[in-house]
Amino acid sequence: MKLINCKWQQLILSLGCLLLILACNSFYPSTNQDAKFLKVATDPTFIPFEIQTASGKLEGFDIDLMNAIAQIAGFRVKFENLPFDGMISTLQAKTVDAAINGITITAERLKTIAFSRPYFKAGLAIAVRQDNHNIKDFNTLQGKKIAVQIGSTGADFAKTIPNARISTFNSGPEFFQDLLNGNVDAVVSDAFATLYAIKNGKLKGIKVVADLLTQEYYGIATPKDSPYLNTINKAIATLLSNGTYKQIYQKWFNAEPLQLPES
Ligand code: ARG
């Protein structure tokens, strides 16, 4: 009789454990080993939004944000390196589930892909060599040699500058090198990335002039009709209201986050 009792006890105990494990998994979906992997494209040359360390690890504001979103939403992220220029067409082809890469939400891009709610307030700025005193704003860019990143909002903006001679590059480090070499007079690119590099001593001899040329917002890009967009948006809202967004912002920019619109 005692032996039977003991068996029952063991059975009840193991059933209890099983239930506990099941319950924990549904409360903390991010620890669920079966959680879906989302393929997220990024180009780790856009510092400090995405950085690849010497050991190959991905870091940055966008990386922290995407991982925090995944934790709330209950999926896991598999980052895939992709050149910025190929990001939109890859989303259209649906070979990745999303892309995070300091991608500006624009009307043109919204024709072919979808975006999450804005997660970062940004804008374009002009960068010149420290000793340049004649380029100050849009007007003084006219007729100048300007470097931009292929497929970026900076490249679109540069097309509107009368008589500008435009050189296009694949990534930030390249166009800044051309500016330092004197091959171009100015770079038009995302202000925050440039200011971050200058502040951290990575762009010696370069300064940012004038105010922001544009006001832009970054969004997480997905294919149109993505089944994940709603979940991503909800997770962003949670991160904004529970202080996590602020923590990540302060970690990378050492400043208070700027106000974001809902859409
Ligand atoms: N925000 C700009 C755009 O969407 C430039 C982004 C550059 N990003 C990058 N990963 N290089 O066009």
Image (cartoon, rainbow, N blue to C red):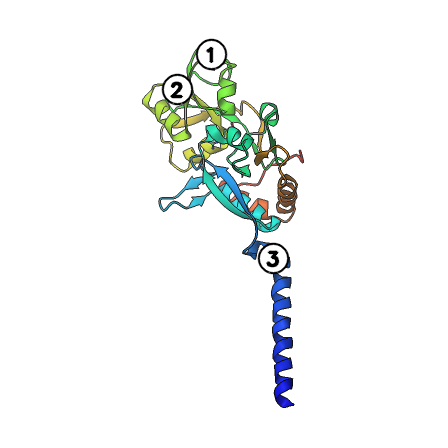
Question: Is disc 1 surrounded by few (<14), some (14 to 19) or many (20+) residues within 10 Å?
Answer: some
Are circles 3 and 1 on residues that touch, CB within 8 Å?
no
Name the mark on residue 70: none
Q: Nearer the viewer, residue 215 or 101?
A: 101
- Which of the 4 image quarters holds residue 236? top right
Name the residue that disc number 1 marks.
142
SS state under label 3: loop
SS state under label 1: loop
Q: Nearer the viewer, residue 221 or 215?
A: 221
Mark 3 or mark 2, which is nearer the start of the sequence? 3
Name the residue that disc number 3 marks.
28
Q: In the image, residue 39 lies at what x, y percent?
A: 52, 42
Give the total number of marks visible in the rendering.
3
- The furthest residue to the bottom: 1
Q: Is residue 118 above or below residue 235?
A: above
User: Spatial distance from mark 2 to mark 3, Cα to Cα?
Assistant: 55 Å
**In the rendered structure, which amino acid carries the disc numbered 2?**
Asn
Q: Residue at x 49, y 10 (%)?
A: 162
User: Spatial distance from mark 2 to mark 1, Cα to Cα?
Assistant: 15 Å
Q: In the image, residue 109 lies at what x, y percent?
A: 58, 26
Name the residue that disc number 2 marks.
132
